[in-house]
Amino acid sequence: MAGNKPRPWSSSTGLARAILHDRMERRKWLVYLMLVPLGMLAVGLWIIDAWIWSNPWHVLLWWGGCAVATCVVMLFALYDVLAVVREEREKIERDVDKR
């Protein structure tokens, strides 16, 4: 066995698991992900506005991509809310069990 380097898939799943299980890390990534559609909105409105409106496909692809990025952020925010509810419920159950 020359080297026990982790495979890319296992490294990625380990990183995702670490991000998804830590509340502060989730919130940090949520802020970073929220900047993507906001940046796309700003770039689309002020920087490449003429290019976008020059072709209907540009409009569809650009604003469709912005919509997809926004949906990803909303899904991640929904996951965060559900994870917080689960964490708080487990915390309450532990406190009740201690009594």
Image: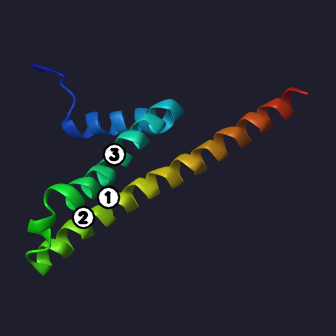
SS class, disc 3? helix
Mark 3 → mark 2, Cα distance in angstroms: 14 Å
x and y percent of residue 45 in the render? 24, 61
Residue of label 2: 65
Residue of label 3: 35
Mark 1 or mark 3: name the one nearer the start of the chain.
3
- Which dot, 3 or 2, sits closer to the camera? 3
Q: Nearer the viewer, residue 58 or 99?
A: 58
Q: Label 1: how many residues lie within 10 Å, few (<14), some (14-19) or many (20+)?
A: some
Instruction: Find residue 69 and name its label.
Output: 1
Which residue shows up at 38% across the image and 48% down it?
34
x and y percent of residue 74 in the render? 45, 57
Which residue shows up at 86% across the image and 34% down it?
96
Mark 3 or mark 2: name the one nearer the start of the chain.
3
- Which dot, 1 or 3, sits closer to the camera? 3
Instruction: Find residue 8 and name its label.
Output: none
Q: Is residue 12 above or below residue 73?
A: above
Q: Is residue 17 above or below residue 35?
A: above
- The amino acid type, in three-letter code, at marker 3 is Leu
